[in-house]
Structures are given as C-alpha cells and as structure tokens.
Amino acid sequence: MRWIVDHSSRELLQHQIAACVRQGVASGELAVGEQLPPAAELAEALSVDRNTVLAAYRQLRDESLLEFRRGRGARVASAVPEPAPVTEAAHTLVAVARRHGLGRHDLIRLIERLT
C-alpha cells in the first residue's frame, strides 16, 4: 500500500493519513481484518509525529473503519462507507451545475482544475 503525505499541503497530516487508509480500503489494497502498521513505524516512514498517526487511526476508528485490539494494533473493521456530507454536497453541485447549463464533462473539467 502507498502511504503518501504532502508536508507542504494545507491539509492536516492526520487527514492525509486517514485518506490513504480510506483509499486503500476502497481500492481493495487493504482488506477487512488486515492489520495496519504500528503508529511508531508508520510515523517514522512518513516523517511525522507518532501522535499524528494515532490521531488519524482514532479518526478512522470513530468512523467505524478501524478497530483497535490491545496487543494486536489497528485493523480494518469495515469497508469504506460513503461519506454522507460529501455525497450530499456532490448532489447539490450536480443540481446547481445543471441549472446553469453545465454538463457532466464541464463539471469534471471544473473539478479537475480545482484539485
């Protein structure tokens, strides 16, 4: 699995780490039950503080994506649920785009320019 963080990004490192896990589960690189690297090991590999990795893991636990077991570390608990706020925002964006005469390809180009 690829763990990539951009230290120059405005996005918090813990959110970037959590996004890596979500993407890994969504793509099938991480399976339900699979153990994630220990926080200290991952922190060293990514050149971040151990607490940053732990914060990302806790965030994912709170989303029910990870589970912690004493002595066994963090494991993937479930498949990635679709984030409701993002889905709602996407529906709103598509509706507004349609009202303004933008088609699918126009919207995709707009999003690609923004990211």
Image (cartoon, grey):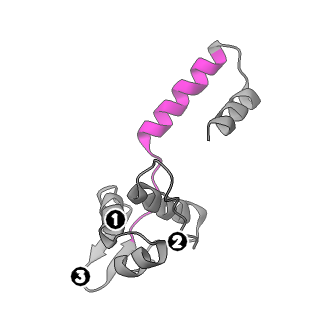
User: Which residue is depicted at the point 45% across and 52% down?
Assistant: 81
Residue type, numbered disc 2: Leu
Q: Which residue is mark 2?
A: 30
Compared across the picture, whether 57 is left or right of 10 comes to: left
**Residue at the bottom extreme, as displayed:** 71
Residue at numbered disc 3:
70
Front one among 9 and 92? 9
Asked whether 16 falls inside the magenta stretch, the response is no
Circle 2: element type: loop
Look at mark 1 in the image and give the residue it sits on. 52
The image position of residue 38, as x and y in percent, is 37, 80
| Residue 107 sits above or below residue 97 on the image | below
Query: Which of the 4 image quarters holds residue 23?
Result: bottom right
Give the extent of the magenta segment. 76-98
N-terminal-most mark, 2 or 1 = 2
Mark 3 Cα shell of 10 Å, populated few (<14), some (14-19), many (≥20): few
Q: Which structural element holds mark 3? A: loop
Q: Would residue 36 be seen by someone viewing this image from the given angle?
A: no
Q: Amino acid at mark 3?
A: Arg
